[in-house]
Image (cartoon, coloured by chain):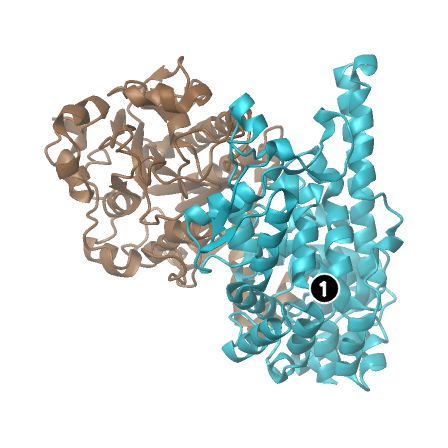
Chain colours: A brown, B cyan
Amino acid sequence: MHPRGLLGSLPLGRRGFLGLSAGFAAWAGLGREGRCAEAAQTDPRLVVLVLHGGLDGLALAAPIQDPAFAELRGDLGFADGLPLVDGFVLNPLMRQLHGLFLAGDALIAHAVASPYRDRSHFDAIDVLEGGCPVPRAARSGWLHRALAVLPRPMPAALPHGLTAAVPIGVVLDDRVPPLLKGDAVPVANWTAGRIPAASEAMQEQVLTLYDSTDPALATALRAGQRLERLADGLSRAAEGVSPAVADALAAASLLAQPAGPRVAVLGSGGWDTHRDEVPALNRRLIELDAIIDALRRGLGQTWGRTVLIVVTEFGRAVRINGSQGSDHGTATVALLAGGAVAGGRVLADWPGLGEGDLLDGRDLRPTLDLRALFKGVLRDHLGVSPERLDGPIFPASERVRPLDGLLRAV
Amino acid sequence: MLEAVTATRRFGVGARPGELTAVADDPKGWVLAQLSAATRGEEAGLPGSREIVHTLVHIYARQPELGISETASLMLDYTRQVFDAERRWRLGAALSTSTPLIERLVWFWSNHFTVSVEKSTDVRATAGSLEREAVRPHLFGRFRDMLQAVARHPAMLNYLDNLVSVGPNSPYGLRNGRGLNENYGRELLELHTLGVQGGYGQQDVIEVAKALTGWRYVNARAATSGAFVVADSWHEPGSVVVLGKTYPQEGEAQGAALLDDLASHPATARFLAWKLARHFVADPPPPELVQAVEEAYRESDGDLAVVVRTLCTHPLSWSLPARKVLPPWDYLVAVHRALDLPAVDGADAMLGLMGQPTWMPQSPAGWPEEDEAWASPLALLLRMGWVEELAGAWPDIDAAARARDVLGGALRAETAQALCALDRPQALALFLASPEFQRR
């Protein structure tokens, strides 16, 4: 049995098979790699890369055998895609990702969306990263809440007593994104730029003052200091590459250290392609491919224990708009990559692009809730206990079951 | 004395030496007096947006003679010159101002109407002029006039793509198969006026986009002028219906009427009041304060002098503790003023490292408002390193005295004690890194 791809879905008819149970059922009988991992990965690493602005999923992985595709997409379609499976092709610029796909280290999930159904960037990001079903309800990020309930003790490789002293989440950005917002576990941010370092004495003075007058600043400063020690020398190592790739290399180096953080979040901007989409998107895709490759190279052996999740806040309207771009839409693509991923597959309960298939007559209709994907990774990769997933981490999501079989059996 | 600190920090850009004493007699009066001061902008001596675009057009027109790469490099050079001059003037204005509330309001509205210079050459060249031409003149006028001015400014027309939005049934649209671009229509409702909870839907977004089709400035490629135009041949013919109201007007009048109505909408009053109170006073803002500002907006039909006066005279605005962390730009300005320095070398690079390069926010929502965004571990390290370096260059400043001078009664006993125990450069750096200097 195979996850229903494009071809499989057409004769079966989609209507009676919508929703989360579909993804669950489709995966239940998988053999070999697809089994539900019996035990979580030992000393796992997780990287989440958030593409800001709304990735046009149809431009990344195209359903070229859907009869409506070529007609609807016009100039935004592409004929020379790299072959995937089930009637999908990958954008020809994504060579590294394609290599990972062929090696079984990358999985493409299509027609995915968070529970958000309107078209505001900011509310969409809030739902995607906050993890609540409606915008502006979350006070912290779902990944932060997941880190707070990770099974203890921390990995055996971590020297005893150091656990609390090491940031377990790291953000490669100048700001901490909603995904890692919260104060339950240490989180620090870092970017690959030259940081004018304050002297040890100065740091001591400031910390003493913060400890006595402003605990919030003290906590943040401590997390930064710890990460700065781990990141010693990383800026130099990343010279000569773009800032985003430099950050990816830095994240990889940090995660690869036994005493380093275990989870990293990266951001990539510029996906809001309202105008002249092809050249704008091509630049972004080339960089995305380079980021994925930098993570793989930088993680070295640790890649085998890593899951990279690539997500965006929403997709784009299927039809091109009046200025060779695309406006805000709904469903899109998410990627999983890493040596821990049971890849080489397109996970799609394909909704179709026919006139009656589109959401609101304009968008790719979501058939897989991203939370099912996140839950599957949290449970089977990080070992988060299933009862935590529905309440504390993704509130009011009991009906969204974790996807089984996303990871290779350990 | 605490009120003087509130005046110079919550409603100002940080005190220069002596300033606190100067305002101490009547801090509220000092704030309110600024409502009738000149909002500047014209004194910048910088070219206007029309001239800037015009210059770019002229360079572009020389392409046959100069070739593509020479033309492109001339355009980039000119753009960079204008951009650098704008940033320099903006920082200079902040450092020298004696009406800091005006600068704070400029930054607030400029961020409300965010553009990013990373969008294009035209935005890079005109982002500064958006502040000077569309924001400053209307600081104490009607919000609707600011909204109308921004909607016609090349920086906004380009940044949110209205420039390329075509009425599908307009002559140009029919001839070339072109159509709408929803980008500006959506953000106009969500970010500039009603707010995301303002009660509009997808169809309203489309109708707003239709009403504004043809609103553009002729850009470099079209090789004529740089003025705002409404291109009739691009404008979608017929009425539009937004939030249940029909707009039958033709041409520019349709969009203009719509913008006026959006500015007067109660959801806009609520959204702007919340945003102002959150930015200036506390996050989350106290509902009582939001309500007072909202009522002031509604009752005055968006008279920003009345709105700002209400915000700046509300008792809560003077009694709530200083908890908001200064964003990098505000911090940079406050440090300069506390040390009474002209703009230091590397200020722009420092802003970039600290995550707030001028006119380069990552999204049309502008810079984040949350403390967490600015008090991140990396940001604190950066600030500490930067002020230590800076303090080393000014060894003669008596930190303890300077801290009392610009922080007055807000200086905590712990900090004052620590300052006395250190040698001068270290003490100065500690003062600038102290919680009471980082928060307002």
Image point 43% across, 17% down: which residue? Answer: A92
Q: Quadrant of residue A350?
A: top left
Picture quarter with the N terminus of chain B: bottom right
Q: Residue at x 82, y 80 (%)?
A: B23
For the question of whether residue B252 can be seen, the reply is yes
Quadrant of the rendering where the C terminus of chain B is positioned:
bottom right
Residue A140 location, x and y as percent?
40, 60
Q: Is residue B286 left or right of residue A136?
A: right
Question: What is the x, y in percent for residue A333?
Answer: 35, 34
Q: Position of residue B425 (x, y in %)?
A: 79, 64
Count of picture labels: 1
Position of A124 relative to A76 (above/below): below
How packed is label 1: few (under 14 Cα within 10 Å), some, or many (20 or more)? some
| Residue at image location 82% in from the left, 87% down from the top | B25
On screen, residue A174 versus residue A18, left or right, reads right
Q: Nearer the viewer, residue B182 or A228?
A: B182
Residue B389, image quadrant: bottom right
On screen, residue B317 versus residue A162, left or right, reads right
Q: Which of the pair B46/A342 is nearer the observer?
A: B46
Chain letter of disc 1? B
Whether residue B344 is visible, yes or no, is: no
Q: Secondary structure at mark 1?
A: helix
Image spot of residue A221 (x, y percent): 56, 61
Kindly identify which residue carries mark 1.
B104
| Nearer-the-camera pick, A358 or B235 | B235
Identity, as a three-letter code, of the amino acid under mark 1: Arg
